[in-house]
Image (tube, helix red, strand yellow):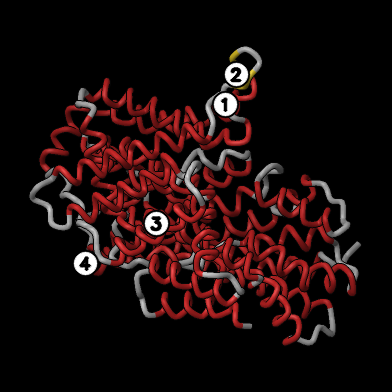
C-alpha cells in the first residue's frame, strides 16, 4: 500500500537533493547555511516519524535560527531569449506535463477505491489526495523529461531555484499549524471565548449573530485557521445563545459561521499557505500583496454571511 | 489571561514586519510557558505538532515539474498563445478560473488546482499576457494582476469546498455538533454553503470587472 510515509520519503529525498545542490555550488554566499536549512528540513521528512518529540522540536528550533540568520538567494532564471527559443521549439507539448498533474490527481482520487493489490488497497484511503499529488508529480516529471528531452538533473536544479525563491516561507505554514497546537494545549481558545461573551451583552438574537460571525472572522485572523475558531466560538456563543436561548437552527448557524471564518482566512498573514506562500511563489515585492487584494471581497462577503444568518437562522 | 501573550507577540511581530518564522517560534514558546509547561515540554509539543503537520509541505513536490516547464518556455508559450486570442481579457480569464475552481472544489476536487501547480505556471502568466497584448505594462500593474490571480484561486477554493459533503470543515462541524448533542446531516450543512458560494462569485466577479475597467482606463491614459 502507498501511504503518507512514502510521500514523506519522496519529499525528504527532494529536499536532500536541494541541500546537496546548494552545498556543491562553490560560488554562492551562505551556501552552508542554506544547505543545512534544506538538509535539516529533509531530515524531518525522512525520519520525523521515528524521531522523538524533543528531536523534532530541536529540528524546528534550528530551522528558525538558520532562517533568521539569512539564507542564500536563489539562482537566476535562464535568460529570456533562451526561454523564448525553447518555447518556440517545444510548442504546445509544454502543456502536456502541466495538465497531467490535475488529470492524474482526478483519476487517482476517483478510482483509488477500486485499485487493490491482493486484498490491500493500493492507495492509503485516509490520504488519497496527498498520494495522488505525489503520483501525479512523478508521472508529469517522467513525461516532461521524455517530451522536452532534458536531463533528469534539470528539474531538480530548476525546482531548487523556485524553492529558494520561496525561501524560509516554505516552512512557515507547517510552523503556524504547530503554533495552533500549542495555543490549543495552553487553552487560548477558552480564554478568548470567555472574554467575548463577557464583553458583549446578548440581549437579542441579532446581536448574538453579529458577534458570532464577526467573532469567527476575527478569531480566524488571529489563529490563521477557521477550524481552530469554530469550536471556540460555537461553544461560547453559537450553541448556548443563537441556538439555545434564541431558538436558532444549528445547521444554518454552523454552515454560515464556518464560512464567516473563511472570510477571516482571506485577511490574515497567519494563514501563510494561502496568503504568504503565493506572494513568494509569484515573486510579489509585498509579502501582504495577496491579502490586500482579498480584504475587500472578504469584508463584503462577511457582511453577506451575517445578513444571511440573521435572516434565516431563526425561521423554522 | 497570561496565555494570550502569544497572540500579542504574533500581532506585534507581524505589525513590525519581523521574520514571521521567528515571531511564530517565540509566540509558541511564550504561550507554552504561560500555560504552565516547561521549556522542554514546549519544544516537545512544538516538535510533535511540526512532525504531524508535515503533510502541509508536500505541495513543494510540484516545484521540479513547474521549474522544468518554465525552463522549457511554458510561460513564454502561454503568453504567445494568449496574445492571439482576442476574446480573452484579464478579467474574463480570471472569472472563468474562479468558476472552474469553485465547481471543482464543490465536487470535492480541491487538490486539482492550486497556487503552485496552476496559478504560478499558467493562470498568472495568462492573466498578465491578456493585458500585455495592449502594450507593455508597468511592474505595479503586473504585480496587481498576479495578486488578483492568487486571490481568485483562494476565493474559489474556500467558497466552493464547503458545498462538498465530505470535506474536512463539514465533517468537523458535524462532529462538533454531534458531541454537543445535535444530530445534523452533512448534506444540510453543504446545502447551506451554496448561498455564500454564489455571493462569493458575484462579489469577487464584480471586483474583477472593476479591475478590468481600471486597467482599461490606465491604458487610455498611457496612450
Query: Residue A288, can we see it?
Result: no
In the rendered image, which residue does mark 1 sit on? A123
* Number of other residues with Cα within 10 Å of mark 3, as a class: few under 14, some 14 to 19, many 20 or more: many
Q: Identify the residue at horizontal 51%, vertical 75% (top origin).
A: B30
In depth, the one of A96 and B67 nearer the eye is B67
Return the residue at label 2.
A115
Q: Residues within 10 Å of mark 2 (few under 14, many from 20)?
A: few
Q: Chain letter of disc 3? A: A
User: Which chain contains the residue that carries disc 1?
Assistant: A
Tag 3's secondary structure? helix
Instruction: Report helix, strand or loop for mark 2.
Output: loop
Q: Badges 1 and 2: C-beta atoms under 8 Å apart?
A: yes
Residue A35 in picture, x, y percent from top left: 24, 49
On the image, which quarter does residue A21 sit in? top left
Q: Distance between the residues labelled 1 and 3?
A: 29 Å
- Inter-mark Cα distance, 4 to 1: 56 Å
Q: What x and y, as percent, mark residue B171?
A: 72, 48
Residue underneath mark 3: A277
Secondary structure beneath dot 1 equals: loop
State how far apart marks 2 and 3 are (Cα): 34 Å
Residue B45 lies in what quarter of the image? Answer: bottom right
Of badges 3 and 4, nearer the viewer stands 3
Residue density around tag 1, few if under 14, some if 14–19, many if 20 or more, within 10 Å: many
Between disc 1 and disc 3, whose residue precedes?
Answer: 1
Which subunit holds the residue at mark 4?
A: B
**Circle nearer the N terminus (2, 3):** 2
Q: Residue at x 21, y 23 (%)?
A: A149
**Residue that appears at 17% across and 49% down:** A75
> Is any atom of residue A16 visible in this view?
yes
Amino acid at each position: 500500500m502507498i501511504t503518507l510515509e512514502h510521500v514523506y520519503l519522496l519529499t525528504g529525498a527532494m529536499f536532500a537533493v536541494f541541500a546537496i545542490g546548494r552545498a556543491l555550488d562553490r560560488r554562492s554566499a551562505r551556501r552552508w547555511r542554506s544547505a543545512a536549512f534544506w538538509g535539516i528540513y529533509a531530515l524531518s521528512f525522512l525520519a520525523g516519524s521515528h524521531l522523538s518529540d524533543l528531536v523534532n522540536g530541536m529540528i524546528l528550533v534550528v530551522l528558525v535560527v538558520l532562517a533568521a540568520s539569512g539564507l542564500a538567494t536563489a539562482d537566476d532564471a535562464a535568460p529570456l531569449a533562451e526561454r523564448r527559443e525553447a518555447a518556440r521549439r517545444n510548442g504546445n507539448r509544454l502543456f502536456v506535463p502541466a495538465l497531467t498533474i490535475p488529470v492524474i490527481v482526478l483519476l487517482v482520487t476517483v478510482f483509488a477505491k477500486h485499485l487493490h493489490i491482493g486484498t490491500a488497497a493500493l492507495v492509503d484511503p485516509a490520504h488519497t489526495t496527498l498520494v495522488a499529488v505525489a503520483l501525479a508529480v512523478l508521472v508529469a516529471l517522467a513525461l516532461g523529461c521524455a517530451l522536452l528531452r532534458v536531463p533528469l538533473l534539470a528539474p531538480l536544479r530548476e525546482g531548487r531555484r523556485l524553492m529558494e525563491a520561496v525561501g524560509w516561507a516554505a516552512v512557515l505554514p507547517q510552523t503556524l499549524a504547530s503554533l495552533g497546537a500549542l495555543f490549543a494545549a495552553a487553552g487560548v481558545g477558552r480564554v478568548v471565548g470567555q472574554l467575548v461573551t463577557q464583553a458583549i451583552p446578548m440581549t437579542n438574537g441579532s446581536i448574538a449573530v453579529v458577534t458570532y460571525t464577526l467573532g469567527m472572522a476575527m478569531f480566524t485572523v488571529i489563529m490563521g485557521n477557521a477550524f481552530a475558531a469554530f469550536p471556540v466560538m460555537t461553544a461560547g456563543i453559537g450553541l448556548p445563545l443563537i441556538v439555545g436561548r434564541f431558538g436558532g437552527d444549528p445547521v444554518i448557524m454552523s454552515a454560515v459561521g464556518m464560512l464567516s471564518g473563511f472570510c477571516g482566512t482571506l485577511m490574515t498573514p497567519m494563514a501563510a499557505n494561502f496568503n504568504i506562500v503565493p506572494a513568494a511563489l509569484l515573486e510579489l515585492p509585498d509579502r501582504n500583496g495577496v491579502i490586500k487584494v482579498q480584504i475587500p471581497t472578504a469584508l463584503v462577503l462577511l457582511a453577506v454571511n451575517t445578513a444571511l444568518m440573521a435572516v434565516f437562522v431563526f425561521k423554522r | 489571561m497570561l496565555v494570550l501573550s502569544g497572540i500579542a507577540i504574533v500581532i506585534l511581530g507581524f505589525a513590525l514586519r519581523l521574520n514571521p518564522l521567528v515571531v511564530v517560534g517565540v509566540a509558541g514558546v511564550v504561550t507554552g510557558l504561560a500555560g504552565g509547561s516547561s521549556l522542554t515540554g514546549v519544544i516537545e509539543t512544538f516538535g510533535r505538532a511540526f512532525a504531524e503537520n508535515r503533510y502541509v509541505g508536500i505541495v513543494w513536490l510540484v516545484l521540479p515539474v513547474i521549474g522544468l516547464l518554465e525552463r522549457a518556455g511554458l510561460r513564454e508559450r502561454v503568453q504567445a498563445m494568449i496574445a492571439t486570442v482576442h476574446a480573452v481579457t484579464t478579467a474574463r480569464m480570471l472569472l472563468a478560473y474562479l468558476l472552474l475552481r469553485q465547481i471543482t472544489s464543490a465536487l470535492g476536487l480541491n487538490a486539482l488546482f492550486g497556487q503552485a501547480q496552476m496559478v504560478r505556471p499558467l493562470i498568472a502568466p495568462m492573466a498578465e499576457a491578456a493585458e500585455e497584448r495592449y502594450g507593455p505594462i508597468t511592474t505595479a500593474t503586473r504585480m496587481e494582476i498576479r495578486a488578483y490571480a492568487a486571490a481568485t484561486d483562494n476565493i474559489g477554493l474556500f467558497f466552493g469546498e464547503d458545498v462538498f459533503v465530505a470535506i474536512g470543515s463539514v465533517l468537523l462541524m458535524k462532529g462538533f455538533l454531534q458531541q454537543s448533542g445535535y444530530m445534523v446531516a452533512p448534506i444540510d450543512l453543504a446545502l447551506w454553503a451554496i448561498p455564500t458560494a454564489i455571493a462569493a462569485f458575484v462579489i469577487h466577479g464584480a471586483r474583477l470587472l472593476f479591475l478590468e475597467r481600471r486597467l482599461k482606463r490606465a491604458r487610455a491614459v498611457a496612450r
